[in-house]
Image (cartoon, rainbow, N blue to C red):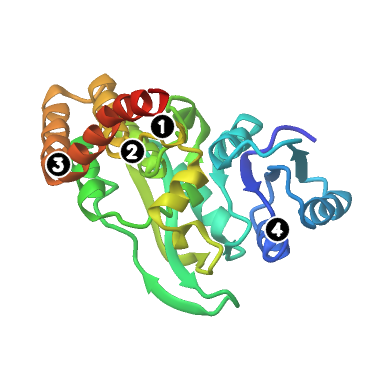
Amino acid sequence: MGEPCVSIGLPVYNGEEYLRVALDSLLEQTYPDFEVIVSDNASDDATESICRDYVARDPRLRYSRLETNQGVVVNSNRVFEMARGRYFRWASHDDFTAKDHLGLCVRALERNPDAVLSYTWTATVDAAGNVLQEDPETEGLDSSSIAERYVTYLDKCGWCNFPYGLIRSAALQRTRLFRDHIGSDHDLMLELLLQGPFAPVPEFKFFRRMHAGAASALDKEALAEHYGHAAREAGCDMNTWRVLGHRLATSLRSSAPVGDRRRIVGRLLRGAMWDRDDLTSELIECLRLPLRSRARSG
């Protein structure tokens, strides 16, 4: 098979409960020119057998298995590194899409050559797939102003559904992809917004499943473990500092006009003032570590 136009990357760990629904919704897309890449993070349930069964039936699906669990960040980045298409989107083992989702997103990018990502609106569904809520995504991310769309995202975006839209692979290659801290999905979207606008498709075509095992249901401590937070493993949770540092660094390094960068940095510093209690407590906690270590060794 030649190189596809679109690559869909599905990182998974122990996804047997909903995986068939997710794969069916991807393989039934009416837009024909795509591949699906599944990276199995050393699952110990039926995930491997399900994937191998689908591979035997559909040559568009590629399956790769890691021998040890490398964490969600490594696995999510891995599917992009394996991708061949000029467009890319992530998929989750517990979500699903309408059959025309991919075609609508491809057309949106082809109609908007400056856009780096296209997305449909998202409906949340329960464990059985019944629609719970339909919310239009944030407006203003298609602005020609870099600062306007960046600040709009910071001020108005809560849930991060945009990675499940369609992204230009060339734009993704210019980012740092996902990082090992809570909120790195938002950081990645902000990096993309520094490069270009998002193109909305105002129809509910992506369905995000809300259930007890979903990442959206995890508390902060469980999320830190989910992301493989290196600083937390060392006993020092500097997540708020890491997010702030990442966003300041990427915005200052960007090719945005000076005025846009000034406005973005100003908004980030105002946000740091709002987060000053978290920033202070994280700093104090890390400063206490050497004292605890000396006390234990003494």
Q: Nearer the viewer, residue 210 or 125?
A: 210
Q: Amino acid at mark 1?
A: Ala
Q: CA distance from mark 1 to mark 3?
A: 19 Å
Question: Up-down: is 258 above or below 13?
Answer: above
Q: Quadrant of residue 176?
A: top left
First-in-chain label (3 vs 4):
4
Q: Amino acid at mark 3?
A: Arg
**For residue 26, side relative to residue 275 (left or right):** right
Q: State yes or no: discs 1 and 3 in contact (Cβ < 8 Å).
A: no
Identify which residue is drawn at 20% across, 51% down.
155
**For residue 73, side relative to residue 121 (left or right):** right
Q: Report whether residue 183 is seen.
A: yes
Q: Amino acid at mark 2?
A: Asn
Q: Quadrant of residue 47?
A: bottom right
Q: State yes or no: discs 4 and 2 in contact (Cβ < 8 Å).
A: no
Could you tell me which secondary element the residue under label 1 belongs to?
helix
First-in-chain label (2 vs 1):
1
Q: Which image quarter is the N terminus in?
A: top right
Which residue matches tag 2?
239
First-in-chain label (2 vs 3):
2
**For residue 63, side relative to residue 280 (left or right):** right
Identify which residue is drawn at 42% across, 50% down.
221
